Amino acid sequence: MLLSILIPTYNRSVFLNKNLTMLKSYILDNDLESKVEIVVSNNFSSDDTSEIIGNFFKDNPTLSILPIHQSSNIGLLKNALEVLKNANFEYVMYLGDDDYIDENYLNGVITHIENNKSTHVVLPSLIEVNIHDEFVKNGRDFELQNSYWDAGYENCLENGWRGHQLSGLVLKRNGIYDAVKKFRFSNLYIFVFFTAYSCLKGNTFHYTKFPVRVTNPGQKNKDWNYGEDGLINDLFDNYINLPLSSWQITKLQLKVIESQPWRLWKYKKVGDKEFLITFKNMWFSKNSTYLFKIAFPLLVLKIAAKKKLYKLLKS
């Protein structure tokens, strides 16, 4: 076996059923039964998720399926770690229960990791869809060409932040669970640590040709939110645990702001007061470095200037 597809799930039985049905088709149509397993952890759902998983397991005896049922709700982070802990094979692919990979993406991943054992990370591109799987808007990296990155800090700097979205993320399993257990993480972005750590350890394939479809159900339907800091402190919690210098960590933190300025500017749409509160919380976030605190306001001014210039050119 080569790849474990990991699906932590909670109260999304309709989406999960669709996802499992699609994966079944991909695996059977491409003769991947000997190469792929599916690990699903039901986080004590109150809907019919248990029945969906049970029926899928019973009806597909030729597939390698590992169903896990939690006896209580253990939270997003622990459930994500639970599927990783129970994976059996060399590589793992995380997949949100309501996100969907392309058949060509799965085949391409399998071919690549079979022939490139120095690869520790495969990163997808993303597009957003609504709950009906209809295109909503462009997401991330879909316009980029496939690219390859050697192991090391430059790889980590360029690609580490891309672990903010779990779906389609492929990792070499050996060592990452043990690495995470060394530290106390309490954030929603543990995949940033997985990605950054793996970029330091091995090569990265940025596989952009077949975007993952990420469902955006609207914030009111999510069981988490961006808080009053755009979840920046959660993101930075992952970087401070990497074996890097303060300056290297600072560059990683600034890269997040530069690559995802929406984490701050989304609050501008709410109001100036909310924007200033978020700005302050980001600036003095507990997990940011001293150097970040010096550079952050300058970077925000630079981003604001670019935004203003873009608006002028567009008008």
Image (tube, rainbow, N blue to C red):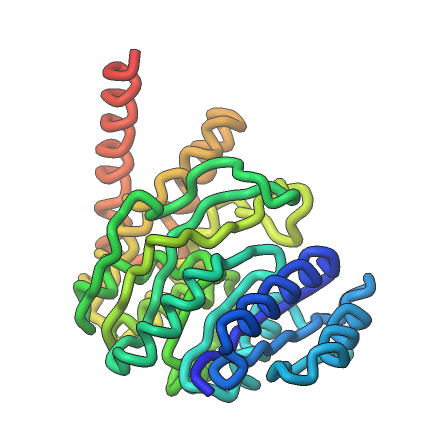
Q: Residue at x 48, y 33 (%)?
A: 267
- In the rendered structure, the answer to whether residue 102 lies left or right of residue 240 reads right
List x then y, in percent, for residue 193.
Answer: 38, 69
From this view, report whether residue 110 is shown above or below residue 129.
below
List x then y, in percent, for residue 20.
Answer: 64, 66
Q: Residue at x 27, y 76 (%)?
A: 119
Q: Residue at x 50, y 50 (%)?
A: 213
Query: 211 or 42, which lies in front?
Result: 211
Query: 94 or 17, which lies in front?
Result: 17
Q: Pick the quarter of the image with the C terminus.
A: top left
- In the rendered structure, the answer to whether residue 83 lies left or right of residue 260 reads right
Query: 252 or 310, which lies in front?
Result: 310
Residue 164 appears anywhere in the view: yes
Q: Residue at x 18, y 62 (%)?
A: 247
List x then y, in percent, for residue 91.
Answer: 41, 80
From this view, report whether residue 38 is shown above or below residue 25.
below
Task: Name the quadrant containing residue 75.
Answer: bottom right
